[in-house]
Structures are given as C-alpha cells and as structure tokens.
Image (cartoon, rainbow, N blue to C red):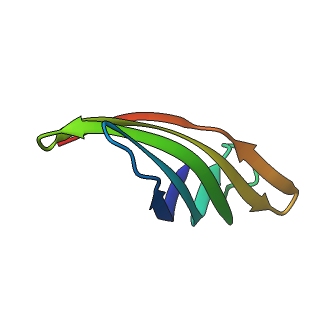
Amino acid sequence: MLNGTLSAVLGLGGIGLQPYLLAGIGSYRLDAGGTEGAQTNRGFHGGFGVGIGALGFGGFAEIRLVSISGDTGNTRYIPVTLGLRF
C-alpha cells in the first residue's frame, strides 16, 4: 500500500502531555498482487493522538481509523503510530 494524505490537527491544550484530534483525506494505492493489478482509491481518516516533549525533543502516539472507498466496498483499518520529534 502506498498512500498520500492531508490532515487537519486540532490541539486540545495541556501541559506536559499535549492531546490532539486529527482528520483528513487521502489517496491510497493498493496492489494485492493478483490479476486485478493495482488500484488507487480515495479515503478518509480520523483519530486521536498525544504528544510529549520539552526543549525541542519529544515523542507522540496516534491511533486512527482509515476508511478507503473501493469498487467492491470499503476497506477499513486502524493503524497505531509511535514516533519521535526533534
């Protein structure tokens, strides 16, 4: 799967931990390796995250629900992302 997304992020404030909501749209290319070949479909996502950090360093954790529209129905998955910011 290869995807490109555009997200809007709404910070919910906080000291130490910074929670936020996010939502957006994307284009998702899926190649299942069968005879159908690759397909590119549109989708949307929404989720929740929390960041922590100080002095320019930190980390974050996010969980999203991704829904991709396809010819034979919708595909949904829930990725969990952990990362570092510096």
34 on left or right of 83: right
The foreground one among 58 and 84 is 58
- Residue drawn at x 47%, y 36% is 81
- Toward which corner of the image does residue 86 lie, by quadrant? top left
Q: Position of residue 53 (x, y in %)?
A: 24, 37
Q: Is residue 7 above or below residue 46?
A: below
Question: Most extreme residue toward the right, as rendered?
Answer: 72
The foreground one among 41 and 15 is 15
34 on left or right of 7: right
The foreground one among 55 and 83 is 55
Say if residue 84 shows up in the picture. Answer: no
Q: Position of residue 17 (x, y in %)?
A: 37, 37
Q: Position of residue 5 (x, y in %)?
A: 50, 63
Say if residue 14 shows up in the picture. Answer: yes
Q: Position of residue 24 (x, y in %)?
A: 57, 64
- Residue drawn at x 11%, y 41% is 55
The foreground one among 73 and 10 is 10
83 on left or right of 58: right
Question: Most extreme residue toward the left, as rendered?
Answer: 55
- Toward which corner of the image does residue 34 lie, by quadrant? top right
Question: Most extreme residue toward the front, as rendered?
Answer: 15
- Residue drawn at x 52%, y 57% is 3
Count of numbered badges drawn on the protein:
0
Q: Is residue 37 above or below residue 8?
A: above
51 on left or right of 65: left
- Residue drawn at x 53%, y 56% is 22
